[in-house]
Amino acid sequence: MDAVLRAAAVYLVVFVIFKIAGRRTLAEITTFDFVLLLIIGEATQQALLGDDFSVTNAALIIVTLVVIDIGLSLVKERSPKLARFIDGMPMIIVENGQVLKARLNKVRLAEEDLLEAARTTHGLERMDQIKYAILEKNGAISIIPKEK
């Protein structure tokens, strides 16, 4: 029972941390972000297993985490409000070439990130070429170019 409670607690803590960190954490990651995720993964593993490194305990933890994930998926299907809280919603961050700075600051993105997404997806070089830039729920930036 200790493993189940520990798994649920760690799941909740990691969820809250990544919710606070924002969607930017889920977007393309830098080397620093990758190293940080490795360290978080190791700390999470230690917190989950505690002193019991048995296969049975590991299996119990895995089952617990999968059940929590399935349970949250089922609850999200029935509650759009909760789904929006857990998954977030797409957010427009550029509209008709104008950066919505308050939104950009809220999600801790830099204009350089927007321009990089515009270059790599559409070959655009300037903000005024962008009709809309949208920060998606998964942290990706979608670019809709202005029509020529």
Image: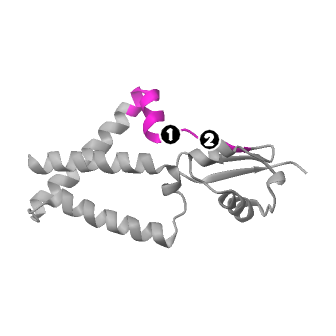
Q: Position of residue 111 (x, y in %)?
A: 69, 57
Viewer can see residue 32: yes
- The reply to whether dot 1 and dot 2 touch (C-beta < 8 Å) is yes
| Residue in the image at 9% along x and 48% along y | 2
Density class for disc 1 (Cα within 10 Å; few <14, some 14-19, many ≥20) is some
| Residue in the image at 70% along x and 43% along y | 100
Q: Position of residue 62 (x, y in %)?
A: 22, 54
Marks 1/2: CA–CA distance: 9 Å
Above or below, 95 against 42 in this view is above
Say which element carries label 2. Answer: strand
Above or below, 56 against 31 in this view is above
Q: Which residue is mark 2?
A: 91
Q: Position of residue 18 (x, y in %)?
A: 41, 50
Look at the image and say whether residue 111 sits in the magenta stretch.
Answer: no
Q: Which residue is mark 1?
A: 88
Q: Tell me which amino acid carries mark 2.
A: Met
Residue interval drawn in magenta:
76-94
* Horizontal relation, residue 143 to residue 19: left or right: right
